[in-house]
Image: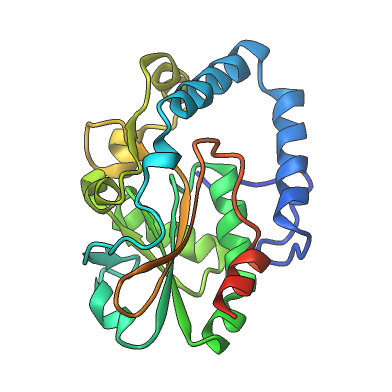
Amino acid sequence: MKWRSLSEATPGLDARPLREIFAERKAKIAQYVPNETQAVHARVIAELKERQLAENALGVGAKAPEFTLFDHDGKLVLSMELLSAGRLVICFFRGRWDPFCCGQMEAMNRVLPEIVQADASLVAISPQSVKQSFFMADQHGLRFRLLSDAGSQVARQFRLVYRVPTEQEAIYRRSFTNLPFINGDETWELPIPATYILDQDSTVLYVAANEDYTERPEPVEILERLK
């Protein structure tokens, strides 16, 4: 289940900009993944963009909903407790099976000390189970909390959720990306990737949502917003 680059670079130590890391992964996908499979993924992204999911996601100035979720150690996490200590950065991601999610989580892990220095905290939310989140945190050496959003209930409140189309579901099944097993439900629903910064009163200060799961904001952009 763990994403590994072909070069087997040590997780968490790649200090390149995220766009460079992603460009390398896209090149490997273009080289090794069948064209017809790539075409399906491209169609899904295009269809999601037509639906304007990112544009309709919870936006700047809105009040974020409160949530209570289990972290990768099975401990209950309350958003209001996190916000009582400072601003909150939230990364919604798809799961540990996605190489772009893994890349983003490792990149955010590298800037975690600077996030803390800016009097903020960081959590990442996905629909995967607590066990899957534990495996991800352990394998990638992540030092922030991964929260399990069963049934994508919190992501739904942020208006990020979509149902995986049938032709893409078939590809995931063939590649052993069994979302019902990974997420613990039969919905085949995922959030589009999105990064939020919340003020202490839950007001959304920043959002970067994108239907294209191969694009994520640079960690330096998050730090600039916090500063």
Instruction: Please give the count of numbered marks on the rendered protein.
Output: 0
Residue found 22% across the figure and 44% down from its top: 151
The vertical placement of 43 against 216, above or below, is above
Residue found 60% across the figure and 62% down from its top: 106
* Quadrant that contains the C terminus: bottom right
- Residue at the front extreme? 61
Residue 226: percent from the left, percent from the top? 55, 77
Of residue 103 and residue 11, the one placed in the foreground of this image is 103
Apparent side of residue 174 relative to residue 118 in the rendered image (left or right):
left
Q: Quadrant of residue 91?
A: bottom left
The vertical placement of 127 against 205, above or below, is above
Of residue 209 and residue 9, the one placed in the foreground of this image is 209
The vertical placement of 36 against 92, above or below, is above
- The color scheme shown is rainbow
Residue found 58% across the figure and 66% down from its top: 108
Residue found 25% across the figure and 54% down from its top: 154
Of residue 80 and residue 57, the one placed in the foreground of this image is 57
- Residue at the top extreme? 36
Q: Quadrant of residue 214?
A: top right
